[in-house]
């Protein structure tokens, strides 16, 4: 498939082939595909790194039912703070599932990019291990790519992979997971969308050896990697080494930190620990070597998204008591903390957030 033109993003930096182009154009109305925005360079070394956020920072604020920002408000807010795109979780796109181009217009009007949306909502099966559920998992994900992500012009699809089996995945379960990812990745690539599994604590791919097993057991043509720096660390891995080893398969980087005490851990912190106080941290928490991560992204010229994946402020979390008054002001403070880190420590050309 021909590359979509974009100096900053170069969205199609992989070869899909003529058959994929025929499939995608046949299924999408003429003129419906989104054109990428030519964003201004923010990184002082590599102009092809783009910076955004997931929606968790306002959807999870205070663990309340209602988000601190609506989808429409969040798009304007993220543009105003100088970030370039948003990767939504399912609760932020519910009202647009049947009208993706209406959502695209909101992003166009704000001058930012709809990066992609995570899986797992709207009745979608996320079981990559259970033989009885795998067909629905594949069909649900392909339909979401075809009907929503592809018309929005997304070039990758970040996915989680369901619940962790008791005791972790067996060799047979890991083999089924890899086979499912291969089959699904082959199908999503027909729409120009790279399947990008996201290793996540408490999921089937949690520990560092499982990350290696997933990537070594899948076909690089069909399965990419969303590298979450916090989750890789919490799973006992070294985010810098993993990103370096699998750089050629890197679709995007989730910028998440944790505490220094979790580096090189032999067991993953539990959900119960996380319920008391978050095991995640704003950038600068000491768990992740972000200068090391960005050295790789710069030296090897990564083309794609580096995005915050920070949970909203929560009582009991580190630094919570120093934040502003209501949920929205606390979210604004969290965004400011992370933007200030990128700007002050890593030299990213984002405006000051005070």
Image (cartoon, helix red, strand yellow):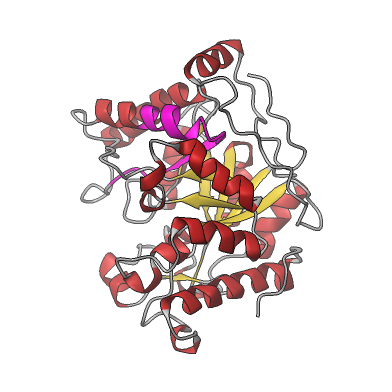
Above or below residue 39? Residue 145 is above
Residues in magenta, as a range: 141-162
Which residue is depicted at the point 39% across and 27% down? 142
Image quadrant for the C terminus? bottom right
210 displayed left or right of 258: left
Residue 81 in percent (x, y) is at 64, 66
Q: Is residue 298 visible?
A: yes
| Residue 158 magenta-highlighted | yes
Residue 14 in percent (x, y) is at 64, 27
The residue most toward the left is 132
Residue 86 in percent (x, y) is at 54, 52
Above or below residue 11? Residue 192 is above
Q: Is residue 265 visible?
A: no
| Residue 215 magenta-highlighted | no
Image quadrant for the N terminus? top right
Answer with the quarter of the image where residue 172 lies: top left
51 displayed left or right of 275: right
């Amino acid at each position: 498939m021909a590359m979509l033109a974009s100096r900053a993003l170069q969205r199609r930096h992989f070869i899909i082939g003529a058959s994929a182009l025929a499939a995608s154009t046949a299924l999408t109305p003429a003129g419906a595909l989104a054109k990428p925005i030519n964003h201004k360079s923010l990184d002082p070394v590599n102009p092809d790194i783009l910076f955004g956020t997931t929606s968790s920072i306002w959807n999870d604020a205070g663990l309340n039912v209602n988000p601190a920002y609506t989808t429409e408000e969040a798009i304007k807010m993220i543009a105003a703070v100088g970030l370039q795109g948003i990767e939504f979780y399912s609760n932020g796109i519910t009202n647009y599932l049947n009208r993706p181009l209406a959502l695209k217009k909101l992003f166009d009007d704000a001058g930012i990019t709809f990066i992609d949306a995570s899986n797992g909502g709207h009745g979608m099966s996320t079981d990559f291990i259970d033989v009885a559920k795998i067909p629905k998992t594949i069909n649900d994900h392909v339909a979401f790519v075809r009907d929503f992500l592809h018309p929005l012009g997304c070039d990758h699809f970040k996915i989680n992979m369901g619940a962790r089996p008791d005791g972790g995945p067996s060799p047979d379960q890991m083999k089924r997971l890899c086979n499912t990812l291969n089959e699904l990745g082959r199908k999503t690539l027909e729409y120009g969308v790279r399947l990008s599994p996201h290793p996540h604590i408490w999921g089937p791919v949690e520990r560092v050896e499982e990350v290696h097993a997933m990537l070594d057991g899948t076909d690089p043509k069909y399965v990419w990697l969303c590298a979450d720096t916090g989750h890789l660390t919490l799973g006992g891995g070294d985010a810098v080494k993993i990103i370096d080893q699998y750089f050629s398969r890197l679709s995007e980087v989730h910028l998440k930190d944790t505490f220094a005490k979790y580096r090189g851990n032999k067991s993953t912190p539990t959900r119960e620990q996380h319920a008391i106080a978050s095991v995640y941290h704003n950038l600068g928490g000491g768990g992740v070597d972000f200068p090391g991560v960005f050295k790789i992204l710069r030296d090897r010229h990564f083309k794609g998204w580096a995005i915050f994946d920070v949970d909203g402020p929560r009582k009991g979390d580190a630094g919570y008591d120093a934040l502003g008054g209501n949920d929205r002001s606390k979210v604004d403070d969290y965004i400011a903390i992370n933007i200030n880190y990128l700007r002050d420590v890593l030299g990213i050309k984002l405006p000051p957030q005070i």
